[in-house]
Image (spheres, helix red, strand yellow):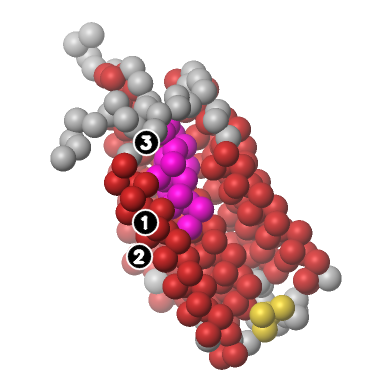
C-alpha cells in the first residue's frame, strides 16, 4: 500500500517537474507545478506530517499558485521565445547540476543503511505536539514571520502600484 | 515499508530539475516557478529527516519555509509586474541591465 502510493505520487511529481521543463507556455508550466505540489502533499502525509500536507495544499497549491496564474493572466504572457540562452549556463551550469545530483545521490546511497525505513503508521507527528513547539518554544520566530508577511504585503502593493505622476 | 533514501533521492532529483529549469527557462515567471520547485524539493528532505529522527522541529522549519516562500512569491510577482510595466517584456535575455 505504502509502496504503491509512494511510487504513484513520486511518478506524478517527477512527471509534473518534467512537464514544467518541457512546456513552452507559462500557464501550462504553472498547472504542472500544481501537480508537483499536490503530489508532494500526499508524500508528506505518507511521512506522517498531516499538518504540513494540509498546509502544502492551502499555502502552495492554493495561495501561491493562484498568485502565479493571476500574474500570468494579468500580463497576458504568450509562448516563451526560443533563444539559445546563456553560454555560461550551458558550459558550467548543466555539468554542475549533474555533478551535484550524482554527489548527493551517492552520499544518500552510501548512508542508506543508517537510515530507518518509513512505515505507514510510525512517526506520525500529532498536531498537538507541533503546536506545543510552535506556540511555546518558537513563539518569537512565529510572530516575526507574521510581521514579515505584513511587510511583504506592503512591499508588494508598493511595487505593483502605478506611479502617481502618470 | 520503504527506505527513507527513496524520499531523499526524489528530493534531490526534484531539486536538480528545479536548477535545470532555472537555467533553461527564458521567461521570468517560469524561472520564478523553478525556484518554487527547488524550495519544495528541500521541504521534502526536511520532512523526511524529521520523520527519520522523530523531531518536531524539522516540520516547524518546513512551515517557516512555506511562510517565507509565500512572502517571496508576493514580492517577486510584484517585481515582475513592475518590470513588465517598464520593459514590456518578460524574456530574461532582454532584462540584462545588471548583467556583468
| Residue closest to the far left | B100
| Residue closest to the far right | A1
Residue at 34% across, 66% down: A140
Residue at 33% across, 39% down: A86
Main SS of the magenta part reads helix
Q: Which mark is residue A78?
A: none
Name the quadrant of the C terminus of chain A.
top left
Give the percent coordinates (x, y) of residue B77: 39, 34
Give the percent coordinates (x, y) of residue A41: 64, 57
Q: Secondary structure at mark 1?
A: helix
Q: Chain of mark 3?
A: A
Q: Which mark is residue A141?
A: 2
Residue B34 forms part of the magenta stretch: yes
Spatial separation of the CA atoms under disc 1 and disc 3: 37 Å
Q: Secondary structure at mark 2?
A: helix
Q: Which mark is residue A145?
A: 1
Q: Which residues are magenta?
A: B16-35
Amino acid at each position: 500500500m505504502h509502496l504503491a502510493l509512494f511510487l504513484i505520487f513520486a511518478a506524478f511529481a517527477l512527471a509534473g517537474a518534467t512537464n514544467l521543463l518541457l512546456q513552452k507556455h507559462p500557464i501550462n508550466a504553472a498547472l504542472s507545478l500544481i501537480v508537483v505540489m499536490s503530489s508532494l502533499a500526499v508524500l508528506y502525509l505518507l511521512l506522517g506530517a498531516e499538518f504540513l500536507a494540509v498546509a502544502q495544499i492551502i499555502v502552495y497549491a492554493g495561495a501561491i499558485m493562484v498568485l502565479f496564474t493571476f500574474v500570468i493572466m494579468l500580463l497576458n504572457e504568450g509562448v516563451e521565445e526560443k533563444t539559445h540562452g546563456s553560454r555560461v549556463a550551458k558550459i558550467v551550469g548543466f555539468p554542475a547540476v549533474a555533478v551535484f545530483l550524482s554527489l548527493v545521490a551517492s552520499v544518500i546511497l552510501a548512508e542508506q543503511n543508517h537510515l530507518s525505513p518509513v512505515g505507514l503508521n510510525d512517526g506520525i507527528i500529532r498536531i498537538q505536539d507541533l503546536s506545543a513547539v510552535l506556540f511555546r518554544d518558537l513563539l518569537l520566530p512565529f510572530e516575526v514571520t507574521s510581521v514579515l508577511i505584513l511587510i511583504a504585503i506592503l512591499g508588494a502593493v508598493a511595487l505593483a502600484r502605478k506611479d502617481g505622476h502618470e | 515499508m520503504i527506505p527513507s533514501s527513496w524520499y531523499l533521492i526524489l528530493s534531490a532529483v526534484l531539486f536538480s530539475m528545479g536548477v535545470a529549469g532555472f537555467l533553461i527557462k527564458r521567461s521570468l515567471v517560469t524561472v520564478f516557478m523553478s525556484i518554487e520547485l527547488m524550495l519544495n524539493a528541500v521541504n521534502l528532505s526536511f520532512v523526511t529527516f524529521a520523520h527519520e529522527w522523530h523531531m518536531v522541529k524539522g516540520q516547524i522549519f518546513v512551515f517557516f519555509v512555506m511562510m517565507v516562500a509565500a512572502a517571496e512569491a508576493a514580492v517577486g510577482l510584484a517585481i515582475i509586474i513592475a518590470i513588465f510595466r517598464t520593459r514590456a517584456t518578460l524574456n530574461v535575455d532582454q532584462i540584462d541591465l545588471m548583467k556583468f
